[in-house]
Amino acid sequence: MGCTAADVVAALRAAAAVVQEHRDELVRLDQAIGDADHGENLRRGFTALLSRLDAEEPASPGKALKLVATTLISTVGGAAGPLYGTAFLRASAAVGDAAELDGEAVARALQAALEGVVARGKAVVGDKTMVDALTPAVTAAASAEGSVAGVLSAAADAAAEGAESTVPMVARKGRASYLGERSAGHLDPGARSTALLLRAFADAAAGA
Amino acid sequence: MTAASETSRVGLVVVSHSEMLASGVAELAGQMAPDIAVLPVGGTEEGGLGTDYGAVVEALADADSGAGVVVLYDLGSAKMTAEMAVESADDPSRYTVVDASLVEGAVAAAVAAQGGAALAAVAAAAEGASGEAPVAVHDRAGQDRTGQDRTGQDRTGQGRSGQGRPALSIVPDAVSAEVLLTNEVGLHARPAALLARTVAQLDADVVVRYGDEEANAASVLALMGLGAPGGRSITVVATGKDAGEAVRRIEELAERGFDD
């Protein structure tokens, strides 16, 4: 079964609820090694997304993803704006005008999103960033053949594991990199939010 | 020289997480470049710390009077926001995001733009401004350089031994002159900016030496770093097509006391 524009919108609404629910947790994580704004910035971005989704109905999955991109870019205000914005923009371009997405298309979109994040932020695996969650997610999605729900579930599991792997890392990108060795021992907030978003998408797909 | 640069100058946009920081940097850079647009963009729409993509997009358009815009930023995510704004422009090649130290880069870029330099040259001036201390001419071995120089001035500047550029005065066909600084303050901010602007208009590489140190005359900050006071002489060494003209104009400037 494919994933329609309405399914994507439902997944985005679910993601907005998860972001709201985890706002304080993300702020706390960012307080430890960053500028303490990640939770609030994402909440602001996804709240703005909700009102845009109330105002307009995207005609295709690709258009829905593009709406996320433009909303996050213009409202987030921190690094997550350009990074998630680029990720959703590339994902949108990867799925094109298709009316429905299958598992393979979703895997391709994730791959494009990762490439966008890497191009924008220049981080690689091991830098203690969202790339550490997104990279294993893309790999898992590519090898998980089957339904959208199956692909996203594999991606979410791998992203959660990838996010946990950032705990011992010393940050080499972003605000946390200024802390040097003191950044070790903390979960990276960007990797955590990536894992949360993918879990929200996977749960929405499973329930659809 | 393009047609655009005859009539318009490169603009600057300063992107910071902080409104106050962006404004302060723009104020400082603008002081040395009265005729160029230096636009600050700082903080989020609500007035908090962060970067506002939409405001950066607007500032790029506002700062562009035809010759393009150099964009400076404070921290990584401001860079990403600036790059996205540039990519969204109709013609991204009109905008250059530079990896430069914010304060020194903005001042150096402003002076280069004021002098009529083209986009690439203004960007290069900003990027070259990091660590713009004067360089010791002879000393590459790291001797003690905190003592008195031969003019008897107490020099508190730290030597940058180990990074010594070759002294340009040994380049053949160089034109050089001893120039007496007749004004009271010597090569301080405004005179240094005037000198750098004069050089920027010409096809010449110019080095200014004072005591044991030399500075690239294209860099206001390096010139100021020489600490050459009024009443002392500097040595101007120029190479390139307009070398003679460059030395002549600097001599004139000094004779006029840098219009102080």
Image (cartoon, coloured by chain):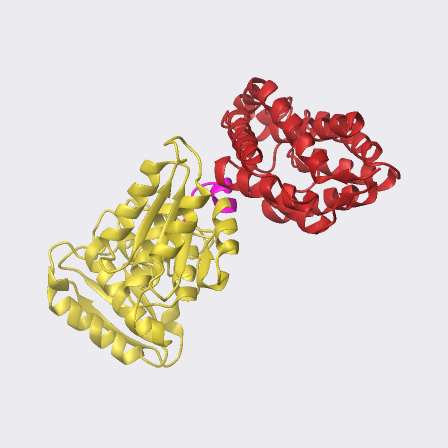
Q: In which quarter of the image is the C terminus of chain B?
A: bottom left
Chain painted in yellow in the figure: B
- Quick check: A142 above or below B235? above
A113 vs B140, left or right, is: right
Total residue callouts: 0
Q: In which quarter of the image is residue A164?
A: top right
B135 vs B191, left or right, is: right
Chain painted in red in the figure: A
x and y percent of residue A193 in the render?
64, 28
Nearest to the observer: residue A160 or residue A1: A1
Nearest to the observer: residue B165 or residue A94: A94
- Residue A62 showing in the rendered view: yes
A58 vs B14, left or right, is: right
x and y percent of residue B168 in the render?
39, 69
- Quick check: B60 above or below A180? below
x and y percent of residue A100 in the render?
77, 43
Stretch in magenta: B72-80
Nearest to the observer: residue A194 or residue B150: A194
Q: At 58% across and 25% down in the image, what residue appears?
A: A182
Membership of B77 in magenta stretch: yes
Q: At 71% across and 33% down in the image, what residue appears?
A: A133
Membership of B47 in magenta stretch: no
x and y percent of residue A2 in the render?
81, 39
A38 vs B12, left or right, is: right
